[in-house]
Image (cartoon, helix red, strand yellow):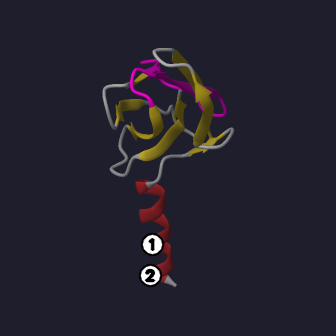
Amino acid sequence: MAVFAHLYILVILILPALTWEGPTTHDFGEIASKKQVSHRFVYRNTGSDTLWIDNVRPSCGCTSPDWSEAGVPPDSLGEIRIVYDGRDEGYFYKTIKVYFRGVRKPERLAVEGEVK
């Protein structure tokens, strides 16, 4: 029983206390060439402490993130806005890693679509 208690505590310390309010992947569909599109990923702080984003890292320079540096209080919503620059034609699938304070493993988001 003690082993399970230690594992439970370890999991709580490693995982951020949040839930995403929608899918973590967004499909833009077809995008006109050289057009910028954006999507908001919304999350809820389900923990008992303020939740802070330390960093958001997109997989390439064509994807830029925007987020508030303010912490998100318990049971409140936060958001990360992702802008994709459709400068290169063809299909794309871009990943975004979200690092929350005190958590080693990032949350992963993705955007996809096709630039025509």
Q: Can the viewer see residue 96 in this picture?
A: yes
Q: Is residue 86 magenta?
A: yes
Residue at image coords 64%, 28%: 77
Q: Can the viewer see residue 43 in this picture?
A: no
Where does the image place residue 46, in percent across and percent down from the top left? 62, 42
Who is closer to the viewer here, 80 or 100? Answer: 80
Who is closer to the viewer here, 24 or 17? Answer: 24
Residue at image coords 46%, 46%: 108
For badge 1, the amino acid type reads Leu
Say which residue label 2 marks: 3
Q: Are marks 1 and 2 in contact (CB under 8 Å)?
A: yes
Considering every residue shown, the one lying at the far top of the view is 35
Q: Is residue 70 magenta?
A: yes
Bounds of the magenta span? 66-89
Who is closer to the viewer here, 115 or 93? Answer: 115
Where does the image place residue 100, in percent across and percent down from the top left? 41, 38
